[in-house]
Amino acid sequence: MFHAPISAALPRTRSAIAALSLTAGALLAGCAAPGAARHFDVDAFLRGSDTALPEVIGNADFLKATRASATQCATLLQSPTSGALEELPSAGLRPAWLLHPAGTPDKVWLIVSETGGERSCHGPLPADAMKTLAERAKGG
């Protein structure tokens, strides 16, 4: 039976440890990279006790996380059977509306006026949370 000296096995062990360290380091770096595992908690944000409608309309992360495609937004806004539009209090911000879709009373869409007159659609969002925000904005 042949036994290799320990010194002969050390380079292989060191190489394996180095490879594992590099792999683990790369994985950790990927997790720490900005946006790698980023998730915006829409429900928690909307239901926050200190959240206000102007903050919702002006929050870039929220708008990005909830934005519908241009095609989906156009379909929502152009269909006569989409539902009812409710104008939201301006609070010095760009105009915004809630679209209450027909047949889904628990969901709404936030419609926000963009620069140049275009509109973006965000949702579907929980109707009860958005109603609370709208009432707060109206002072109710």
Image (tube, grey):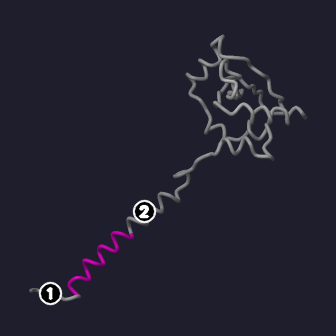
Do the numbered discs 2 and 1 sit on residues whose CB atoms are within 8 Å?
no
Q: Residue at coordinates 85% horizontally, 36% vertically from top-left?
A: 136
Tell me where residue 79 appears, x and y as whole percent: 63, 13
Tell me where residue 51 appears, x and y as whole percent: 78, 44
Mark 2 crowd level (few <14, some 14–19, many ≥20, 10 Å Cα): few
Answer with the quarter of the image where residue 137 lies.
Answer: top right
Tell me where residue 72 appears, x and y as whole percent: 57, 23
Disc 2 marks a residue whose amino acid type is: Ala
Where residue 18 is drawn, which disc sits there? none
Q: Give left or right: position of 3 versus 39.
A: left
Q: Is residue 38 above or below residue 123?
A: below
The number of numbered discs placed on residues in the rendered structure image is: 2
Q: Does the magenta portion include 78?
A: no
Q: Is residue 107 above or below residue 47?
A: above
* Residue, far top: 80
**Quadrant of the frame with the N terminus:** bottom left
Q: Residue at coordinates 69% horizontally, 45% vertically from top-left?
A: 44
**Magenta stretch secondary structure, dominant:** helix
Q: Which residue is mark 2?
A: 26
Q: Residue at coordinates 53% horizontally, 59% vertically from top-left?
A: 32
The stretch in magenta equals 7-21
Answer with the quarter of the image where residue 20 lies.
Answer: bottom left
Q: Which residue is mark 1?
A: 3
Q: Secondary structure at mark 1?
A: loop
How far apart are the two marked residues, 2 and 1, measured between alpha carbons?
36 Å
